[in-house]
Amino acid sequence: EGGGEGEKSEGASGEESEGSGEEESEGEEDEEAAVAVGRPSHRADGKVFYRQMKKGEETYEVGQDCYLENGADVPYVARLQEIFVYSFASSEVYFNARWYYREGDVHEYAKMAGASGKVKYEGGTLTAAPSELFFSLHFDENHSDCVLRPCAVHLLDERPDGGFGPHEFFAWRAYEKKAVYPLEALPTKKLRDAYATEAKRGPAAKAAAAREASEKERRKREETEARETARETALSADELRALVMPRRHAEVWIETRAFNRVAVDSLVRCVQRLNGQKSFYVGLVIATKRAPRPYRLGKKLVEMSLQLRTSVGTRLAGLDTLSNDAPSEAELQRFKVPLNPVHMRKHMRKVQAAMSEHAEKFDEQDLLRRAEEEERLRRAREAEEEAERAADEERERKGREREEMRRRAADKAAGGGAAEPEQWWLSYNVTRGDASGREVAKWRARLLRFEKIAKATVAGGERENAHVPP
């Protein structure tokens, strides 16, 4: 077995030995040659060890998985264990790596180690998935020239949620002495210790470390802001009003790339209607969201809404609900959302700088807004006058109808006749105390009407049965 694995190491570094006869001319530098990065971590046995090396555009560190050149179409895969240079040749970068085996490697190395046939697993011939590799104890030294590019090997349960990318693999089994074992049931302490070491610095462990570093940086930043806040005074009412983004400004920002940057952390005054009553509230913009459906903002059709934090919780508000007026003192007092004075003052300066950059847009928008406001008021006045004229005409028409009905009733009364039963109400006036008589007359008129309907129905049926035309 040892001889077979030695051949793999030789293949990975063979390119360097083949090319060693052609030395570069003095003074020329190989742009693709690896260089050690950072300070040395330690020195031992004539070697200087580093945590990272850079080759081309890529930076590699201890624990990184990578492809290694072997002269074949399918490269080797290994994980860097140590990066070092020899004290007498500091420009040549070497590394020690732990190899992963492919399915064919397992059968080949088992055969070289004396196996009579292919490796068996759970009663059958060993097979592997396309992206599957096998963990191993194979560990040796190579020159950095054979490093091709980074890749990632997920051990056991580190499989990413979205599956594997083009340079991602997984390993849940290990090869050792002509046999294969699951990583959770390794037979020797040496294998278990090696797996425990690699599990701590695999892709999942690196992602967790990155998240922890990001969280640590976030806590540090929050602590710094908290210290600055403790030294700052609270925001005044004038400062709060200066933080408010009016609707006319939102209509300008929505047309620029700066909209999200300016809107988030601004205050807005929004209108709401509850039980038919209109009221206003103040909210802090915490994000911009895509609206459930497009809506009109002036003459534009927009699909953007604001996620607000208010005194009663979080809500979505359209830009068409924004007010152009500053919030009142009572509205500011009802706004109980805690604000960081340091952060909000920085945002205020950021918005002012952005407005200076777009000063021409705001000037043009103000002129257009005034013209549109005058046109809107003119149309509103015309509509109001037209509605008043229509209402006057309707009142006059109804008045004429009532006069005509009263005149006819008076003429019939003067001629000795009674008012038509269908117009019984013309003879009664509730304000003179005859409400009960009015109710009696109403029901008599209804009864008379029902009798007419019944007689007409019966007469019509009899004519139909007798085939007599009406």
Image: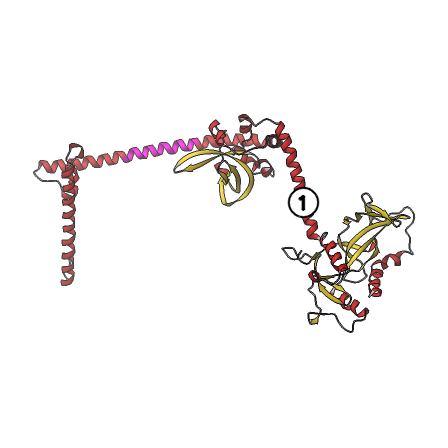
Residue at x 26%, y 33% (from the top left corner) = 396
- Residue 298 in the image: state x and y as whole percent: 49, 37
Q: Is mark 1 on a helix, strand or loop?
A: helix
- Of 79 and 29, nearer the camera is 79
Number of marks in picture:
1
- Residue 266 in the image: state x and y as whole percent: 56, 34
Q: Identify residue for label 1.
A: 212
| Image: magenta residue range | 377-394
Q: Can residue 239 be seen?
A: yes
Residue at x 78%, y 74% (from the top left corner) = 116
Q: Main secondary structure of the magenta part?
A: helix
- Of 392 and 43, nearer the camera is 43
Residue extending farthest left: 416
| Side (left or right) of 355 relative to 402 | right
Q: Is residue 460 in the magenta section?
A: no
Quarter of the image containing the C terminus?
bottom left
The image quarter in which residue 445 lies: top left
Residue at x 43%, y 33% (from the top left corner) = 279
- Residue 192 in the image: state x and y as whole percent: 74, 58
Residue at x 58%, y 39% (from the top left corner) = 260
| Side (left or right) of 238 relative to 78 | left
- Of 432 and 251, nearer the camera is 432
Residue density around tag 1, few if under 14, some if 14–19, many if 20 or more, within 10 Å: few
Q: In this view, does 200 lie above or below 134?
A: above
Q: Can residue 408 be seen?
A: no
Which residue type carries mark 1?
Answer: Glu
The image quarter in which residue 12 lies: bottom right
- Residue 431 in the image: state x and y as whole percent: 18, 32
Residue extending farthest front: 189
